[in-house]
Image (tube, grey):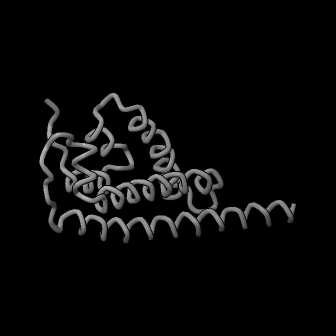
Amino acid sequence: MPHYKSKTLATWIALVGGVFGLHRFYLKGWRDALGWLHWPPTIIGIVGFLRVQQLGQDDRLAWALTPIGGLMLTLACAMSIYYGLLPDERWDARYNPGSTVHATRWAPVIGVIVALLIGGIALMSVLAYSTEFGYMAFFADQNT
């Protein structure tokens, strides 16, 4: 018999560990291929962030790698928002088939609010960071 899957827990797991696919492992198990595919781009983004910390903002590789991690963070926040806003009836039909509908309270909504804040900041940072890199790369090529 499958275990009960909590909408609240899935929302918060996606927010806290979604960059590593932990929400997918919670919902679909350790054999979920898409969950494992979260790891490489997240690690690439972490490497980019560490390069910025160690080598400064002039490192072109860091400028290319860091936005990938930001996009993974944005994706994790989007999944948290999706899980938190999914109606209880649809949640239980999809992840707890045959069980009675479990009404959630405010915890998923608070998770959605936090995910909106973090995801919005991450997405705007990725856009600003990527645009600045493209601008620098274009004008660096023009001056040589």
Residue at image position (23%, 63%) is: 108
Q: Is residue 63 left or right of residue 77?
A: right
Give the vertical position of 140 relative to 72 (above or below).
Answer: below
Residue at image position (42%, 65%) is: 119
Question: Where does the image place residue 46, in percent across and percent down from the top left?
Answer: 46, 49
Q: Is residue 92 left or right of residue 140?
A: left
Residue at image position (87%, 60%) is: 144
Q: Nearer the viewer, residue 77 or 68?
A: 77
Q: Nearer the viewer, residue 58 or 7?
A: 7
Question: Where does the image place residue 24, in percent across and percent down from the top left?
Answer: 33, 41
Q: Nearer the viewer, residue 95 or 74?
A: 95
Q: Nearer the viewer, residue 61 or 2?
A: 2
Quarter assignment of residue 32? top left
Quadrant of the rendering where the N terminus is positioned: top left
Quarter assignment of residue 78? bottom left
- All told, the count of numbered labels is 0
Residue at image position (59%, 63%) is: 57
Question: Where does the image place residue 131, in percent across and percent down from the top left?
Answer: 65, 66
